[in-house]
Image (tube, grey):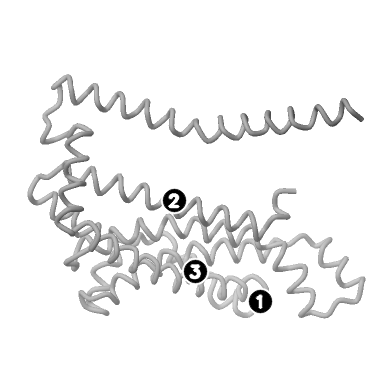
Amino acid sequence: MAVSDRARPTARFAQMLSAGAAAGLPLVSFAFILGIWSAVGLSGVVNEAIFPAPWSVWSATVEMWQNGTLQKDLAKSLGRAGTGFAIGATLGVVLGLLTGRVALVRTLLNPFLNLLRPIPAIALVPVAIVWFGIGEGSKYFVVSYTVFLTVWFNTHHGMEYVPDIYMRASRSLGASRLREFVTVVLPAAAPHIFAGIRLGVALAFLSLVAAELSGASSGIGFRLQEARQYVRTDRMFSLLIILGILGAVTDLIVHRIGKKLVHWEQG
């Protein structure tokens, strides 16, 4: 008993070391890339106007923050991405539930939705501007369209491929259709649904930039376009890095929420 008690702190310490090492690996990767980037900047091999050094990118970030444009653009872009994602994800989940379980809806809509899937978001920007103008509606449409198709496909796939043994077991126990749907079908499809939602978050930022590159007067995409016109590659790199950080943090949050809500997937 005493040996077991002494072993527990050791095991916990080993787990903490392992978790710390796993968390530190990304930092090692970033430090490595930053070192190479700095070395290239110091060497002077590449023109600073084409490939800015890390300190130039940092200075551009501070400049945009101090004059207030960065905060304004971040707020606009996050609002557009959040609204478009909420609309697209909600429609995607609802329609995916229907096409996955209702044969008539699946027959009527699946061929059309599969036809839409290869169309990139940027190709819809001109149509969105014609339909909704250059206001916020066109941005919401482009983002929600991209998110909707991704979430719909994953939800549909999850609902369609619930193992038959689960269905037979629930019916043999006398479960009603509603109870079978809530307690068997939805939990079995939930990992696919959350996978689609997680992918939809990344695509929301991707399509957001496409929507903001034309017909916008604010936002990260608009500021990228403006930086290109003035050949401010330092600002372009800064904005791209900020986009990457935003996407990574949002993805991590959604992933953590998914692990909490769909904890049975880990088994």
Q: Could you classify mark 1 by the number of other residues whose Cα lies within 10 Å: few (under 14), some (14-19), or many (20 or more)? A: few
Q: Secondary structure at mark 3?
A: helix
Residue 82 vertical position relative to residue 13 in the rendered view, above or below: below
Q: Amino acid at mark 3?
A: Ala
Write the residue at 67% across / 63% down.
189
Q: Is residue 218 left or right of residue 174?
A: left
Q: Secondary structure at mark 2?
A: helix
Q: Which of the two discs, 2 and 1, labels the residue nearer the N terminus?
A: 1
Displayed quadrant of residue 221: bottom left
Measure how far apart labels 3 and 1 are at the Cα level. Answer: 22 Å
Q: Is residue 113 left or right of residue 43?
A: right
Write the residue at 18% across / 22% down.
42
Measure how far apart labels 3 and 2 are at the Cα level. Answer: 19 Å
Residue 20 vertical position relative to residue 226 in the rendered view, above or below: above
Q: Amino acid at mark 1?
A: Ala
Write the residue at 49% across / 55% down.
199
Callout 3–callout 2 Cβ contact below 8 Å: no
Front label number (2 vs 1): 2
Q: Nearer the viewer, residue 130 or 87?
A: 87
Task: Give residue 94's position: percent from left, percent from top.
Answer: 57, 75
Callout 3–callout 1 Cβ contact below 8 Å: no
Q: Which residue is mark 3?
A: 89
Q: Which residue is mark 1?
A: 103
